[in-house]
Image (cartoon, helix red, strand yellow):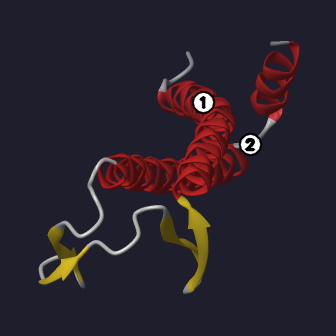
Amino acid sequence: MAAASSTKGEMEKMGIEQLKAVKEQADLEVNLLQDSLNNIRTATSRLDSASAALHDLSLRPQGKKMLVPLTASLYVPGTLDDADKVLVDIGTGYFVEKTMEEGKDYCERKINLLKSNFDQLLEVATKKKSVADDAGMILQAKLKQLSTPTS
């Protein structure tokens, strides 16, 4: 908190244009961090779905007829050949064959990593939001002080 109060003290010494620039920069950073947080939420949701699909697939017997997704809206009929081996998308179009347990473990590790990154980004975003709010309040006070006529 001492760092935040010293930053606030520094902002009180700034001119109006500098305060506007600080507020705009902090607001921009907050928006970028919010976008990153939303992307992490989306990725976590997809990994949760993949983990649930792996669990469901592991319960199906070999030779089971099923629909195989080619795209989000296109499915083709197929037969489950070997439920113990799965292809895991490790990014940028690369897939690795893993056992079912290794695939589940991969999903869990990625989910834990994303949750850790989410918590760290949330902390940074909260601090940036606080800086933007402080800059806005100080800016408003200075503008009000300028507009108030002194007798």
Question: Mark 2 Cα within 10 Å, few/some/many (few <14, many 20+)?
Answer: few
From the viewer's side, name the closer residue of 57 and 108.
Answer: 57
Where is residue 86 shown, x and y percent of the image?
Answer: 48, 69
From the viewer's side, name the closer residue of 71 and 23.
Answer: 71
Looking at numbered disc 2 in the image, what kind of residue is underneath it? Gly
Under circle 2, the secondary element is loop
Q: Is residue 82 above or below residue 38?
A: below
Where is residue 136 shown, x and y percent of the image?
Answer: 55, 34
- Is residue 112 toward the left or the right of residue 57 in the image? right
Where residue 151 sits, quadrant-wise, is: top right
- Is residue 4 toward the left or the right of residue 6 in the image? left
Residue 27 visible from this viewpoint: no
Residue at x 72%, y 49% (from the top left corner): 18
For disc 2, the marked residue is 15
Alpha carbon of mark 1 to alpha carbon of mark 2: how far? 25 Å
Q: Is residue 114 above or below residue 75?
A: above
- Is residue 63 toward the left or the right of residue 141 in the image? left
From the viewer's side, name the closer residue of 90 and 126.
Answer: 90
For disc 1, the marked residue is 126
Residue at x 42%, y 49% (from the top left corner): 51
Residue 8 visible from this viewpoint: yes
Tag 2 or tag 1, which sits nearer the N-term? 2
Looking at numbered disc 1 in the image, what kind of residue is underneath it? Thr
Under circle 1, the secondary element is helix
Q: Is residue 13 above or below residue 6?
A: below
Residue at x 62%, y 54% (from the top left corner): 102
Where is residue 63 shown, x and y percent of the image?
Answer: 24, 70
